[in-house]
Image: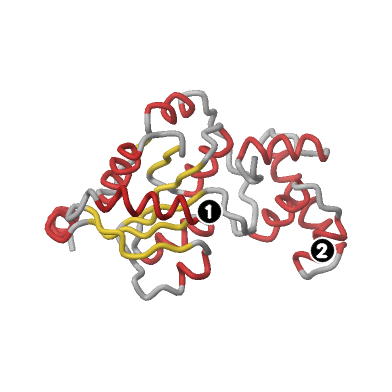
Amino acid sequence: MNNSSEADRKRMAGIRVAILDDHRLVLDGLVARLAREEPKLTVVTVHARWADLLADPALPVDVVVIDLHLGDSIPITSKVRALAAMGSTVVVMSRHSDNASINAALHAGALAFVAKTDSADDLVAAIHFAAESEQFFSRSVSRAISTLTEVADAGLGHQEQRAMTLYASGRSIREVAEHMDTTEETVKSYIKRARRKYRDIGIDVGTRSLLRRHASREGWLGP
């Protein structure tokens, strides 16, 4: 199906939306607000946990609205990629509109970012834009984006990225190894390779403080 016919279908049938947020009051409020957009928008399912959303037979939907800082250890990148593979685009919401949070959403591949301090109208606009595979950022988010600097990709492997994120969060090598179900020597190897890759592109993460600063800037860690 080409883009024009897909857009026509969405205009006729309405945009099917799923929402993922671990606060029940937020979910209820969003559903009530988006209900006013019918038949343009239809909230077909809401969930508080990522696993429950994935298991929902209503997927794929046109747009998934997802909270950036869910209480789980699954990176936003993994969530966005999984939803994209199903055919859904993603709007990220966050109670924070700092550079690290926005950068995390952008690097993950989200098409829109809305701060929870923005208006419900901003979220509605973001959903419409995402359904058309176009980017949308509210005025407050756009101002923050203008200050972002592009960081070169170090090309970390999945396990290297995971080890670096866990280590940057304050865990010891032993704790990272236990979390990843591997040996301490393997974790040390992941971190050593990752640091070398960053050094090759001119980014110094050779100490725990430098690594944590980089991790915070890139949105690996929650605020």
Q: In this view of the protein, which residue sits in the foreground, 218 or 35? A: 35
Count all numbered tags in the image, as a single digit. 2
Residue pointed to by mark 1 = 77
Residue type of the residue flagged with mark 2: Ala
| Above/below status of 142 relative to 121 | above
Element assignment for label 1: helix
- The image's mark for residue 177 is 2
Q: Residue 148's x, y, as percent? A: 52, 28
Q: Residue 223's x, y, as percent? A: 65, 40
Residue ID at (25%, 48%): 132
Q: In this view of the protein, which residue sits in the foreground, 20 or 156? A: 20
State which quadrant residue 187 falls in.
bottom right
Q: How far apart are marks 1 and 2 (CA)?
A: 22 Å
Q: Quadrant of the N terminus?
A: bottom left
Seen in the image, is 157 located left or right of residue 136?
A: right
Q: Residues within 10 Å of mark 2 (few under 14, many from 20)?
A: many
Residue type of the residue flagged with mark 1: Thr
Seen in the image, is 210 located left or right of residue 66?
A: right
Seen in the image, is 7 located left or right of residue 181?
A: left
Q: How crowded is mark 1: few (under 14 residues within 10 Å), some or many (20 or more)?
A: some
